[in-house]
Image (cartoon, rainbow, N blue to C red):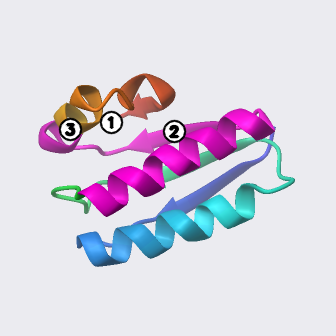
Amino acid sequence: MSMNTVWLKSDEAGAVPALQDVIGHLDGAEGAVVLDFSGVLRIDTRALGAMEQLAGRADQNGSKVELRGVNVGVYKVLKLTGLAHRFSFRT
């Protein structure tokens, strides 16, 4: 299984384009994608939408998405919106 690592910027405006770029790379790709969230302090609704789209595309392709360095606040938002179970987490 191949693994691709993507680094997200610390602001919400940088996270959405990075997530959309990852979604584009998942088309026809197999394996796992690792997203480093260590610089993401909070997440907005646009980023949540992009993450939902990413999870859906990963499900379609049979890919796994691992989130690393997710802070408690971001994890709580993912949990409350029902997205947390669609990703694996590593500190």
Give me the disc on residue 18: none
- The residue drawn where x is 16% and y is 58% is 41
Image location (x, y in percent) of residue 40: 24, 60
* Amino acid type assigned to the residue bearing label 1 in the image: Thr
Q: Nearer the viewer, residue 15 or 89?
A: 15
Of marks 3 and 1, the one in the foreground = 3
Of marks 2 and 1, the one in the foreground = 2
Of marks 3 and 2, the one in the foreground = 3
- The residue drawn where x is 20% and y is 38% is 77
The magenta-colored residue range is: 45-74
Q: Specify whether residue 28 is painted magenta.
A: no
Between discs 3 and 1, the one toward the N terminus: 3
- Cα gap from disc 2 to disc 1, whole angstroms: 10 Å
Q: Is residue 77 above or below residue 21?
A: above
Q: Nearer the viewer, residue 31 or 47?
A: 47
Question: Which residue has dot 1 on it?
Answer: 91
Image location (x, y in percent) of residue 70: 28, 43
Question: Which residue has dot 3 on it?
Answer: 77
Image location (x, y in percent) of residue 35: 48, 52
* Amino acid type assigned to the residue bearing label 2 in the image: Glu
Badges 3 and 1: C-beta atoms under 8 Å apart?
Answer: no
- Cα gap from disc 3 to disc 2, whole angstroms: 16 Å
- The residue drawn where x is 21% and y is 44% is 74
Is residue 24 at all visible to an observer of this figure? yes
Badges 2 and 1: C-beta atoms under 8 Å apart?
Answer: no
Question: Which residue has dot 2 on it?
Answer: 66
Q: Residues within 10 Å of mark 3 (few under 14, many from 20)?
A: some
Q: Is residue 71 above or below residue 82?
A: below
Q: Nearer the viewer, residue 18 or 67?
A: 18
